[in-house]
Each structure stands twice: as structure tokens, then as C-alpha cells.
Image (spheres, rainbow, N blue to C red):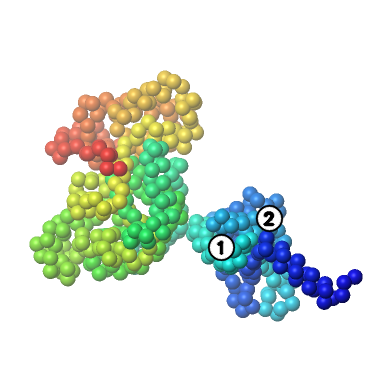
Amino acid sequence: VLPPELRFACFRFLKHALGCYYSYCYFEITNTDGLNTNNLYDAVQLYLSSFASTSCSRLSLSRVCNSSSTTFVLSNNDCIADVFGGVSVQWKHVVAQSQSQDSPWGEKRSFTLWIRNATGTVSSTPTWTTMDKANDIRRKNRERLLYTNSHGGWRQVPFKHPSTFDTLAVDPERKRDIMEDLRDFMAGKAFYQRTGRAWKRGYLLYGPPGTGKSSMIAAMANFLGYDIYDLELTKVHSNSDLRELLTTTSSKSIIVIEDIDCSVKLSKRLKAEQATPRSAAHDSKDGNNNTITLSGLLNFTDGLWSCCGSERIFVFTSNQIEKLDPALLRSGRMDMHIYMSYCSYPALKILLRNYLEYEDKDLGKAAVSSLQETIERAKMTPADISEVLIKNRRNKEKAVSELLMVLKARAERNEKYGGMREGCELNGVEDEEQEKCALDGSEEGSHDDDDSCY
Ligand SMILES: Nc1ncnc2c1ncn2[C@@H]1O[C@H](COP(=O)(O)OP(=O)(O)OP(=O)(O)O)[C@@H](O)[C@H]1O
Ligand SMILES: [Mg+2]
């Protein structure tokens, strides 16, 4: 038996010797610091719950008020391995009886983070990364909000639109491109910083009514986990009101201006501004007693003001892109112009899958080739097609045969009248009216179906 001094010396020697091979540092993250609750503890819990479900066999489940998902919590003394920047770490959840009066539950909860540390330097990076990731998870789990402007401020309601990129009937390749663009944007903090650009992105969605522009915005919000600010320009009275409204929007949000071609007469304003630049700069009143100007709006989308707040997406929608001011369309202003087209066959397949749970193989060869052949000529919007499918969804065969009938009728009518003006292609518009529209439309010129700008 070694005397105590020698035992202690041996212990220190062994510890030092082993430390040459494996040195560890660890952080203890307790649920309170004695007085206040520790946000980092909650963040770690949330972060671990995102992957603990696949790595652990024993988990506690919980669901927080206003959250849309269940949280997995590591059980007492359970460990989970993780990696940060190529370094292996280990998390351990420890629940111990507390002697302290401060602990309301009579127990002390903590996470211990073990980091294998070859260099001997201690880094707290994993804890910050965890905090960021937890914030992302929290945002995705919580209810999204839809803000609308009224009486000079924002009014919010829970946003529960069920549209997602899965339910959206858009060509899969195009959908993938948009999703990749959004993903790059979200992960682009360092890129935007390095290139000296404001962390924002602008999308212009254009196309006939009922092609899914609003549904696309909802799908974007659900995909990113962002809130939506639906800006009604007709309720904004001046550039300074607009600035006030936009500065009070939060980061990680989508700011939407629907039907920008009819919200306010921005093109006319631009001309007025050019004629009287001084008065425009001072928000002078125009004939309509309304003083939002295109430059006021653009100051926010790409001027100095665009940098207050970060991670913002601007989405403008329009049914008639040709009516928009070229200043709004010039390159670099809206990063992506997305044409929402009439329903194509790949998009129709998505609708058939969503509404009837039909795949190609369920349709039969004859139906597939008839649908493929008529869909492009019919120029029907996904909204029109959805109506036919919803109406007949209890009888799938009937739904397909009726759809074929409607498509053929539309295709023939289009051929007869040589294409129609988009505004007339609403459900329920009578033949005679459509005929009239077809004739009127020929004067204005048809819609530019070229989607090459996307
Ligand atoms: N691409 C699509 N994918 C799935 N559903 C769609 C699509 N387009 C339209 N719909 C259906 O039609 C309805 C109307 O679509 P939505 O409001 O998104 O069209 P829009 O292009 O915004 O029309 P508007 O120009 O009139 O505002 C939606 O409720 C949706 O169910
Ligand atoms: Mg819409």
C-alpha cells in the first residue's frame, strides 16, 4: 500500500502522461445560474432534440406551448456524440438532487460538453453554434405570423397556410432551383458579409391569375420558417410611412407586395419624380394625394435602407409584367424573375398525386398520352385544374375523364380564338365573354410566355 503522498504523486503523473495523448476540456451548462434561468441550457436541449431521436434509445418527450412540434429530451446521465468543425464532442445530461434553496424543483439539471482537445486550447465555439442552431429550430417550430399593415402599423395573425413545395404544382426542376436558391440564401451569412452585400434577396413572381404566386410565397415561408409581412401599398400614405413600416419588420422575414402593377401607379410616379426631383425627394403630394414613390420603395429593396435588419426576402407579384416600370425590372434589382406558367404535364402530375393520389401508372397509357397532348394547348391554370379535381375527388376515374373533357374543350376554344387574354381565363367566364376578350386581347398583344429570364 502506497503512502498518501506517493499515491497523489502517481495520480498526478498518470494524469499528465495520459493528457499527452488525450486532453479534454469540458463545459458545464446548468439550467440556472442560481438566480436566472440559463438560456444556453434551453438552447442545448432544443439543439440535441433535433438529432437525439435517431441516436438514443431512451428519451423524454415534451411539447412547449405555441410550438408545432414535439421536443425530445435526453434522459438523465445519457450521452450523445456530436461533431463541431471536425472535432468530436460528447454531450451528457445530468440531473442531480440540489441542496440549494434556489432550485424550485429540488434538482439541478445540466449538460456537460466534453471536447477532445488535442491542441490544448479551449474553444467555446460549439456553444455559440448550438445557440444559433437552437434559434433556427425554435423559429421553425413556432407558429409563423402573417403581418398586415393597417392604421400605420403592423397587425399580426397566425399564419397557417398549408402550401409547401411538395404541394406546389410547378415543374420539379424549376422548383428544385428555387429551393436551392432559398437554401443558399439562408446559409449565406458569411458570403454576403465577404462580398459586402446586404443579406437580402428579391423575387418577382409573375404570371396569370391562379398559377400559384401566392401559394409559392406561402411555400417559401413554410420552407424557410420565416414570417410574412404583406405590405398593402394603397394603405401607405408617404415614403416616410413606408420607411417607418419597413424598419419595424423583423429579420428572417418575407416582405410581400402583391399585384405591384396595380397597387399604386409606380410608373407614373417615376415620371413625376424625374420631372420634379426636388419635390419627390421631399415627399411632396401628387395629384392623388398619395406620396409613395418608386424611389422610396427601391430605397428599401436595394438602397441604404435595405441594410437595416438582415436576412430579408422581398417578393413582388404581378399579373402583367409588361406594365411594370423598367426600373423595377432592371438587372440586379429583383434577383430572380420567376414566371408562374399555365399547368404543364409535370405540374399536372403533382396535382393528380395530391388530389387523387394518382401516379402515372394508375392512369393508363391512353389517359397519360391524351393528357400530355392536350395540357399544353389547353393553357389552363393549376387553379382551374384543381377545381375540376376537387369537384370529382370521390370518383377518381370520373375526375380524370372530366379533366380530359375540359382540357380538350379549352384547347379547341384556344385554337378557335387564337389564344385569349389572360384576365379572361377565370373559372366560370362564359364563352361569349371569352370570345370578346380574345378579340380585345389581340389589340394589347399577348402575354410574353418566355420564361427565359428565370
Ligand atoms: N402552382 C400551383 N400549385 C398548387 N396549387 C395551385 C397552384 N396554382 C394555383 N393553385 C391553387 O389555386 C388557388 C389559387 O392560387 P394562388 O392564389 O396561389 O394564385 P395566384 O397566382 O396568386 O393568383 P392571383 O394572381 O389571382 O393572386 C390556390 O388556392 C391553390 O390551391
Ligand atoms: Mg395571389
Which residue is at 67% across, 63% downward? Answer: 20
Quarter placement of the N terminus: bottom right
- Callout 2 amino acid: Leu
* Residue at image point 68% right, 52% down: 56
Could you say which is closer to the camera, residue 41 or residue 315? Answer: 41
Which residue was labeled with disc 1?
126
Q: Regarding mark 1 in the picture, which secondary structure is present there?
A: helix
Q: Amino acid at mark 1?
A: Pro
Q: Secondary structure at mark 2?
A: strand
Q: Which mark is residue 59?
A: 2
Question: Residue, x 64% and y 67% (percent of image)?
Answer: 26
Q: Do we see residue 161 in this rendering?
A: no
Q: Give percent across and percent down for residue 378.
A: 30, 30
Q: Is mark 2 within 8 Å of ligand 1?
A: no
Whether 380 is drawn above or below 161: the answer is: above
Of labels 2 and 1, the one closer to you: 1
Q: Is residue 148 above or below residue 4?
A: above
User: On residue 435, which mark appears?
Assistant: none
Residue appearing at x 68%, y 55% in the figure = 59
Q: Residue furthest right?
A: 1
Mark 1 closeness class: few <14, some 14–19, many ≥20 residues within 10 Å: some
The percent position of residue 297, horizontal first and vertical second, equals 25, 61
x, y percentage for residue 127? 56, 65
Q: Is residue 119 toward the left or the right of residue 187 in the image?
A: right
- Report whether 413 appears left or right of 272: right
> Is residue 266 found left or right of 402 in the rendered image?
left
- The percent coordinates of residue 250 (x first, y second) are 39, 64
* Label 2: few (<14), some (14–19) or many (≥20) C-alpha neighbours in 10 Å: some
Residue 246: image quadrant is bottom left
